Image (cartoon, rainbow, N blue to C red):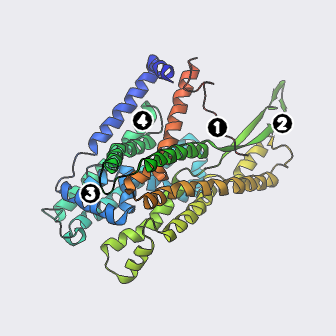
């Protein structure tokens, strides 16, 4: 692996891409520490710290995760990449619902660029709405236990906050696109991963604090168990991320003039976790929203719903697992259309051995997807609720338990594997040894 890393620096083009990527990530991390004008960051951080102790995981915690801690300090990058993610999800749903967008998505590169442009417009619009609501929320000291977060409330502060946070969100979107074009790896995912990994030193410090002598000292067996669980969780996430079912496809020979086309065999890979981390994001956003609203609205009914959906409770864990499995099917149904795939295969003379082309092939695809999505969704649900279970069982902070599973671990492992694959392809294309012994990362085939 060390030799492969040295080889990657020997290739001028690859070295330039790696350096550009690292430089953009460093610039992004610098922006997460530049405060928004007019906001008392110290008091706001104190509020979020107390909120984390009493509520554990909440909607602000999810936003803080994706922004790399910028929400807690309300810096210029406080909105992070969440508006872009929300806009992308909305565009995916609209592409399925609106025929004009579905037609545009099938027009190749030009259609894809048009949809990306609409996603950018949606990102800016969502950023304006979210930043204005944040400004109104910050101006009310009663919501912060009497803490005055804003010294000079009013329309000047609101407009300045909207301008600052919207510009910051648009700039993050531009940085991600620059990594995509001039760097290596998925730009948006790498920025999220950088934000998650920035929390690792704080979590490590909390673990060291728990190891010190005192009434809350952690026993050595507990520490060994935590290390074992972390390694097992990483292995499980790698298996889930790489697992796929390969469907063999045979293309019939076609004679055009004096040339013979087709006749080759290939396969269609169906990933076990086709939705990635999206099912967890959907489920957590739905469940944590009532709990977060209950913090600020003193309504008895909302308070009861908030108490029932508090992170770490048994009902919350069971409901989270159910919603993750449900959204695994939901996102797979949106991302993959078996009828279109079957029609395209039939159009170009492709067929699955033993299955008739057309409607029978689409039914076969549905059968396979339903079989692999259920265990994939259950596996994803178990990893997602691991922080809540471990945190409650071992009585450790949620920020520490979050590294034993959940959204953070899935994103870090998935993005790391994807980035290594891209570097591997660059090395092997130039006849260098890759990071693995066989020179490539093999996908684990689900049976």
Image-based side of 55 in relation to 364, left or right: left
Q: Residues within 10 Å of mark 3 (few under 14, many from 20)?
A: many
Q: Which residue is mark 2?
A: 252
Query: Which residue is found at the position 40% from the left and 40% from the top?
Result: 176
Relative to 206, residue 150 above or below? below
Q: Residues within 10 Å of mark 4 (few under 14, many from 20)?
A: many
Q: CA distance from mark 1 to mark 3?
A: 44 Å
Q: Which residue is mark 3?
A: 162
For marks 2 and 1, the one nearer the N-term is 2
Viewer-side label of 4, 2:
4
Q: Are marks 2 and 3 in contact (CB under 8 Å)?
A: no
Give residue 115's position: percent from left, percent from top: 50, 49
Q: CA distance from mark 1 to mark 4?
A: 25 Å
Tally of numbered tags: 4
Q: CA distance from mark 2 to mark 3?
A: 58 Å
Q: Which residue is mark 4?
A: 179
For marks 1 and 4, the one nearer the N-term is 4
Give residue 272's position: percent from left, percent from top: 64, 49
Image-based side of 291 in relation to 131, left or right: right
- Say what secondary structure mark 4 lies in: helix
Relative to 329, residue 219 above or below? above
Residue 279 is drawn in which quadrant?
bottom right
- Say what secondary structure mark 3 lies in: helix
Give residue 316's position: percent from left, percent from top: 49, 68
Query: Which residue is found at the position 37% from the left and 78% from the top?
Result: 303
Q: Which residue is mark 1?
A: 443
Give residue 326's position: percent from left, percent from top: 60, 63
- Say what secondary structure mark 1 lies in: loop
The answer to whether residue 124 is visible is no
């Amino acid at each position: 692996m060390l030799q492969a890393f040295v080889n990657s620096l020997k290739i001028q083009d690859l070295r330039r891409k790696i350096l550009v990527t690292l430089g953009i990530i460093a610039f992004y991390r610098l922006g997460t520490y530049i405060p928004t004008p007019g906001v008392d960051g110290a008091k706001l951080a104190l509020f979020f710290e107390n909120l984390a102790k009493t509520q554990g995981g909440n909607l602000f915690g999810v936003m803080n995760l994706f922004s790399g801690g910028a929400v807690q300090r309300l810096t210029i990058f406080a909105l992070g990449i969440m508006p872009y993610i929300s806009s992308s999800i909305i565009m995916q749903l609209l592409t399925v619902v609106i025929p004009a967008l579905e037609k545009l998505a099938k027009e190749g590169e030009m259609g894809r660029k048009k949809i990306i442009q609409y996603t950018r417009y949606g990102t800016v619009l969502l950023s304006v709405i979210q930043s204005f609501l944040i400004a109104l929320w910050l101006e009310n000291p009663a919501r912060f236990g009497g803490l005055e977060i804003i010294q000079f409330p009013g329309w000047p502060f609101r407009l300045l906050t909207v301008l600052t946070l919207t510009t910051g969100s648009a700039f993050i979107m531009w940085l991600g696109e620059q990594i995509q074009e001039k760097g290596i790896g998925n730009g948006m995912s790498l920025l999220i991963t950088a934000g998650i990994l920035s929390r690792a030193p704080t979590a490590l410090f909390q673990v060291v604090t728990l190891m010190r002598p005192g009434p809350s000292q952690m026993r050595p067996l507990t520490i060994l168990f935590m290390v074992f669980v972390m390694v097992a969780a990483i292995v499980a996430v790698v298996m889930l991320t790489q697992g796929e079912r390969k469907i063999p496809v045979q293309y019939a020979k076609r004679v055009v003039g004096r040339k013979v086309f087709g006749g080759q065999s290939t396969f269609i890979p169906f990933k076990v976790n086709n939705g990635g981390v999206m099912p967890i994001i959907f489920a957590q956003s739905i469940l944590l929203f009532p709990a977060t609203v209950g913090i600020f609205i003193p309504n008895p009914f909302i308070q009861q719903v908030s108490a029932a959906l508090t992170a770490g409770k048994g009902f919350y864990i069971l409901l989270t697992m159910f919603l993750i499995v449900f959204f695994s099917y939901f996102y797979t149904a949106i991302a993959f259309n078996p009828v279109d795939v079957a029609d395209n295969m039939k159009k170009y003379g492709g067929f699955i051995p033993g299955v008739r082309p057309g409607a029978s092939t689409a039914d076969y695809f549905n059968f396979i997807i339903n079989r692999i999505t259920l265990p994939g969704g259950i596996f994803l649900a178990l990893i997602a609720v691991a922080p809540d279970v471990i945190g409650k069982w071992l009585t450790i902070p949620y920020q520490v338990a979050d590294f034993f599973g959940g959204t953070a671990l899935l994103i870090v492992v998935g993005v790391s594997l994807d980035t290594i694959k891209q570097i591997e392809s660059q090395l092997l294309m130039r006849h260098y040894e890759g990071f693995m012994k066989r020179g490539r990362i093999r996908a684990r085939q689900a049976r």
